[in-house]
Amino acid sequence: MIKNVLFDFGGVLYNLDFSKTFDAFEKLGFSDFEQMFSQYNADTLFQDLETGKITASAFYNRIKAMAPQPVTDKQIKDAWNALLLGFRMESLEFLIQLKSDYNLYLLSNTNVIHYDHFSSQLLEQTHYPSLESFFTKAYYSQDIGLRKPDLETFEFIIKDAGIQPEETVFVDDTYSNFPNAEKLGMKIHLLEPGSLIENIDFKNF
């Protein structure tokens, strides 16, 4: 019996378009940005940002050092945030209904720059005080110092939340994030492109 639902954020509750960030960095002179960062892969710089090992300022400085032409912090920030399109409002509303039947958790590979941006969007577009208000607890990679798909990430959440993995379903839009969650006993649901969490039959796991 499922008691807990662990949600990914981007591509599940929030719309992303990585190509917009690739295009934005290309306009800043980067020819290989997609090789450095994508939905499925991130090199050391981006992993360090996502696990809170470096600050936003340090990130900007390292990007500027790699840039083929002079760029400002704002240009980098705008390009980095270009992939962030907006919340799936109906999915947020659905979480409120779902919360009456399950313990809801969030697990997101994100970073302080993106977090600040989508938090401001939420305040501007809704009456909800924070994304965290929808969940029993939200786990952001930059806060816990751990990222998906690492085994240690799921072990940490299971222990910290005090949940049983076999009573938990993990919803993500990226299949490569699943193997270690499954290894620990979690059930999984891949949210295919165009699908919405409102259409998941949580009672069927």
Image (cartoon, rainbow, N blue to C red):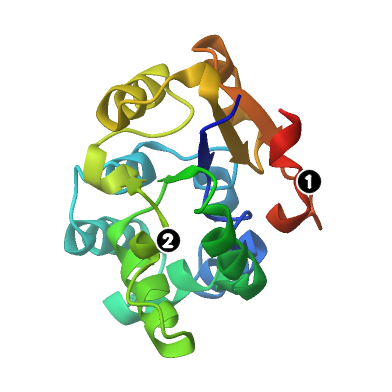
Residue appearing at x 42%, y 61% in the figure = 134
Alpha carbon distance from label 2 to label 1: 23 Å
The amino acid type of the residue labelled 2 equals Phe
Residue appearing at x 62%, y 54% in the figure = 12
Left or right: 34 in relation to 78: right
The amino acid type of the residue labelled 1 equals Glu
Q: Nearer the viewer, mark 2 or mark 1?
A: 2
Residue furthest bottom in the image:
124
* Nearest to the observer: residue 67 or residue 160: 160
**Height in image: 192 above or below 68?**
above
Residue furthest front in the image:
100
* Nearest to the observer: residue 36 or residue 31: 36
Q: Give the residue pinned by disc 1.
A: 192
Q: Quadrant of residue 92?
A: bottom right
Left or right: 199 in relation to 98: right
Residue 119 at x, y percent in the picture: 36, 73
Query: Label 1: few (<14), some or many (≥20) within 10 Å?
Result: few
Q: Give the residue pinned by disc 2.
A: 134
Residue 152 at x, y percent in the picture: 34, 19
* Nearest to the observer: residue 49 or residue 97: 97
